[in-house]
Amino acid sequence: MKRILMIAAIALVAVACNKNQQAVKKLEGTWDITKLEFEQDLFGTPITVDLVDLGGSGSMTFDGCKLKKDEWCNVSTTLHDPIQDTTITTVSLYRVTNDGTVLETKENDTASTINIITIVELTDTDLKANWTQDGVPVDGELKKR
């Protein structure tokens, strides 16, 4: 009985790792941001703002890698903010956890703050995700090039 439980536990871990690695494989490449939506308070009234609809743009380039325990992969993000007319490019680290449903990012190897992004949908060509940025919920959609 112990042996059966041990084999079942190992099988579950292997399946979870496979789902995470499958998500990394799907993410590998460059994705264009097609929606970046959040609520903004305008004179006491919350309005929904989509930076892409306002003329903003951006992309994310995920490097492929093999996930191992505590291994992080590289991701580069470029975002043009039409409101401030600025373009910022950042390079950070990412990994996929929770059976391919969570994308975690951090600034570098020594950073203790991990940003949690919920993967709502991930196909070979489309990514839908949501997260909280500075206390504000954000919905994002990306399309693979």
Image: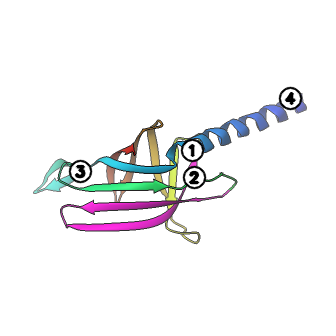
Q: Position of residue 108 (x, y in %)?
A: 54, 69
Residue indicated by mark 3: 52
Image depth: mark 4 or mark 1 in front: 1
C-alpha gap between disc 4 and disc 2: 35 Å
C-alpha gap between disc 2 and disc 3: 27 Å
Disc sitting over residue 4 in the figure: 4
Q: Disc 2 or 3, which lies upstream in sequence?
A: 3
Which residues make up the magenta segment? 70-97
C-alpha gap between disc 1 and disc 2: 6 Å
C-alpha gap between disc 3 and disc 4: 52 Å
Q: Disc 3 or 4, which lies upstream in sequence?
A: 4
Q: Amino acid at mark 2?
A: Gly
Disc sitting over residue 64 in the figure: 2
Crowdedness near tag 1: few (<14), some (14–19) or many (≥20) residues, C-alpha within 10 Å: some
Q: Are marks 1 and 2 in contact (CB under 8 Å)?
A: yes
Residue indicated by mark 1: 25
Of 89 and 83, which appears nearest the observer?
89
Q: Position of residue 53 (x, y in %)?
A: 19, 48
Crowdedness near tag 4: few (<14), some (14–19) or many (≥20) residues, C-alpha within 10 Å: few
**116 above or below 108?**
above
